[in-house]
Amino acid sequence: MQKQLLLGVEAIGQGAIDGGMSGVYAYPGTPSTEITEYIQENTLAEERNIHRQWSTNEKTAYEAALGMSYAGKRAMTCMKHVGLNVAADAFMNSAVVGINGGFILAVADDPSMHSSQNEQDSRFYGKFAMIPVLEPSTQQEAYDMAYEGFQLSETTGLPVMLRITTRLAHSRSGIEQKEVLPENALILPSDPKQFVLLPALARRKYKTLLAKQVQLEKLSEESKYNMYFEGTDHSLGIIACGISYNYLMENYQGKTCPFPVLKIAQYPVPSRLIKRMEQECDEILVLEEGAPLMEEMLGDFFGKGTPVHGRLDGALPRDGELNPDLVAKALGLTTFVGSNIPEVVANRPPALCQGCGHQDVYAAMNEVLADYSKGRVFSDIGCYTLGALPPFETIYSCVDMGASVTMAKGAADAGLIPSIAVIGDSTFSHSGITGLLDAVNENSNIIVVISDNESVSMTGGQDSSAYGKIESICEGVGVDPAHIRVVVPLKKNHGEMVNIFREELAYEGVSVIIPRRECLQKAARRKRNKK
């Protein structure tokens, strides 16, 4: 079989292609973005004409993938952990209706919040929905789970979550590929009402989902990904979930871990193996990347009060990523402590690129808002969020995708006039349009600044779904065309931008200002590719 050196995200993409996938649907979001990008550039995916275009947001991606599954084909949808919040409605209900063709949800969590708003652990979603969850400990397992996940999905009749974290997503290892499988034939569900969630049907389907839990636990007990390793020292047993198993093993290179170890990479949890560890060991240490899901669950399994250590009792930090040193410390092993960073080394916070159009937008806004109290600008998720930092310090909120428009509206409803929303072109199409419709319906006194750099720049420069459509969308929603203002954000146009902001501040209603200039990084890539 062919071998490749792949990132964890690339291994998932390759595994899904080799596993007979017919389509991937996703919205860019670090650390999941490269799964789809890898498939987009893959030769076999191109030869097979596998669907691999970006979706407008995670909800539309999930639903489109579910539609492909409905038609009998194998489909995957990819997103980061907070993107699953956007897709949660479709996700939860898909567990009830089930699937037709194999369906994988690849979700990438971001402990330590390298590029995210929170440390959300998607395993809780999997447990909540009562579906199988796969959590690879290596890049090879990531490939194997993507390859085999479609069959697991078709065997159980349920979506399968493939959960990874940042460290596995963006580290590289050798992968051994399997035989490339053919794509499924087009075939509709045998039950014509399978995907109909009228209450009477939904109640019956929910009972079916509950009944499947016995099968899911049996599959988990028998899974090759869940392994119990004997140990000679039973004073401690170790449960290691996903990549945390690697962190444990790095402390025992060239030697054997003396304690019994239960490696868990498929859920629901294998209760028989957990009970075995309880019976054999005096205490338990739980290693898991993310929230203490397993640690909290052990109280339901242990009847004799076996002490459990992990993130909840301080044996491991409650937040952030794990690493081999943190695991070593929890085991009482000697750890390496590096030197402190000298105070003369200054911090280098992230900053907008020199010459970025967002800078010119904030310069104009700050001049116009100098006569008002601070706290009037609500931002969204994107490069422009850096406007919260010096030297601009213009924005005062960044909560979730689309919240800038609706928070500005709510603040205006409360009497905070003027209220301004700053949102990017891609985020506007992702989840800002509905908030703008709310504002139009109530003629809210807000200004919505759609800072259009014609790109999903923060995640690598993917094409924006709103490209070439923003003015039409705003008009279609009901914004008065006279108050849809377009300007090129350049220093030479500073006076024009200031005048536009002042004119729209004087207007009592919904204004949309669109500063438009291509992202510098995307423009540079485009010029290089052209050469």
Image: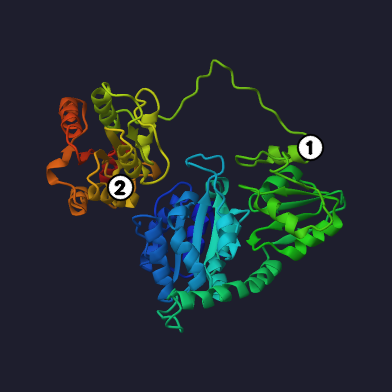
| Residue bearing mark 2 | 428
Amino acid on which the number 1 mark rests in the picture: Leu
Residue 105 percent location from the top left of the image = 49, 61
Residue 70 percent location from the top left of the image = 42, 74
Query: In this orientation, which residue lies closer to the viewer: 60 or 503?
Result: 503
Q: CA distance from mark 1 to mark 2?
A: 50 Å
Q: Residue furthest top?
A: 344
Query: In this orientation, which residue lies closer to the viewer: 348 or 390?
Result: 390
Quarter holding the C terminus is top left
Res. 254 mark: none
Element at label 2? helix
Element at label 1? loop
Q: Is residue 104 above or below residue 231?
A: below
Look at the image and tell me whether residue 156 can be seen.
no
Marks counted in the figure total 2
Residue 420 percent location from the top left of the image = 29, 35
Left or right side of 273 for 355:
left
Amino acid on which the number 2 mark rests in the picture: Phe
Residue at 39% x, 46% y is 401
Q: Residue furthest left?
A: 482
- Front: mark 1 or 2: 2
First of labels 1, 2 by sequence position: 1
Query: In this orientation, which residue lies closer to the viewer: 174 or 70?
Result: 70
| Residue bearing mark 1 | 333
Left or right side of 138 for 201:
left
Residue 54 percent location from the top left of the image = 35, 56
Q: Residue furthest front?
A: 414
- Other-residue count near label 1 (Cα within 10 Å), few / some / many at <14 / 14–19 / ≥20: few
Q: Is residue 56 above or below residue 342?
A: below
